[in-house]
Amino acid sequence: MEKLRRAHESEYSVIGGAVENGRPDGLVSWACYFADYGGFMLPSDRKVTPILAGNHISYKREIIQERLDSMGEGFWKFFFNQELTRRGIPFLFDPELVAYYVPPETFWSFARRYYQHARFFAALRSREMSLGVRFLRAVSSPALPLLLLYRRLRAPFGKGRHRAELLLSVPFLAAFVTAWAAGELVGYLMGPARPPQQVYQ
């Protein structure tokens, strides 16, 4: 918290940091970590970036107050960050700030939650899409698992750490990204919806 306070003495209004695996005790745990936060693993340089970890991001008060009325809706950070990027507000990644992700789930519970998140995420995005764009998103969903798997392998592999765990967890990661793609498909087809109760408790 002290490091975060000092970081916010800078001119940056949006600051995030690294995310490490806080439960390195099995391949499922590693797969859960790589599925969500492998790209934010150390080492990394201090840099301006358009992407910060959703579980390790902080805002100056005047920035966050703009979004107080919509925080009850899931994925508000994703859409809020997009809006800030369009406004030209830079994001700072500070590797001195480190959070530890502790996967609480089994393989099946994580896959189920991944599917539910993807379905709701796609449903929210579809609010601003025409039927034609939603259809194109839906029909391209079968190609999504390979793209998502590549993205989740590329960044952490380049870090030079935990490569064995990353490669051994590929079967689990493949299942997770397939669940995500299936969720996106249903979300685009079904359109806007409220978040499932079990996803945001």
Image (tube, rainbow, N blue to C red):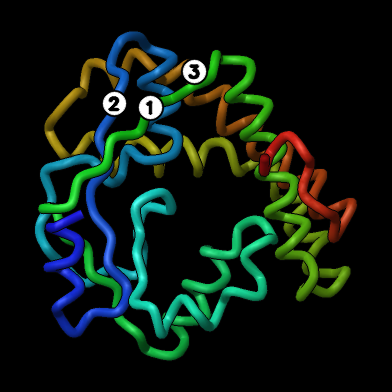
- Mark 3 closeness class: few <14, some 14–19, many ≥20 residues within 10 Å: some
Q: Earlier in the sequence, mark 1 or mark 3?
A: 1
Q: Tell me if residue 154 comes above or below residue 163 in the rendering.
A: below
Instruction: Please indicate whether residue 116 sits to the left or right of residue 43 in the image.
Output: right
Q: Where is residue 68 in the image (x, y as percent from the top left)?
A: 58, 74
What residue do we see at 18% from left, 66% from top?
A: 5
**Residue type marked 3:** Phe
What residue do we see at 34% from left, 77% from top?
A: 60
Q: Position of residue 49 (x, y in %)?
A: 27, 68
Q: How far apart are marks 3 and 2 (CA)?
A: 18 Å
- What residue is disc 1 on? 102
**Residue type marked 2:** Gly
Q: Position of residue 42 (x, y in %)?
A: 15, 41
**Mark 1, secondary structure of its residue:** loop
Instruction: Please indicate whether residue 55 sits to the left or right of residue 108 in the image.
Output: left
The one nearer the camera, 77 or 152, is 77
Determine contact: label 1, label 2, CB under 8 Å: yes
The N terminus lies in quadrant: bottom left
Q: How far apart are marks 1 and 2 (CA)?
A: 5 Å
Q: Which of marks 3 and 2 is nearer the N terminus?
A: 2
Tell me the number on the disc at residue 131.
none
- What residue is disc 3 on? 172
- What residue is disc 2 on? 22
Q: Distance between the residues labelled 1 and 3?
A: 17 Å
Instruction: Please indicate whether residue 104 sits to the left or right of residue 69 in the image.
Output: left
The one nearer the camera, 149 or 161, is 161
**Mark 2, secondary structure of its residue:** loop
Determine contact: label 3, label 2, CB under 8 Å: no
Q: Earlier in the sequence, mark 1 or mark 2?
A: 2
Determine contact: label 1, label 3, CB under 8 Å: no
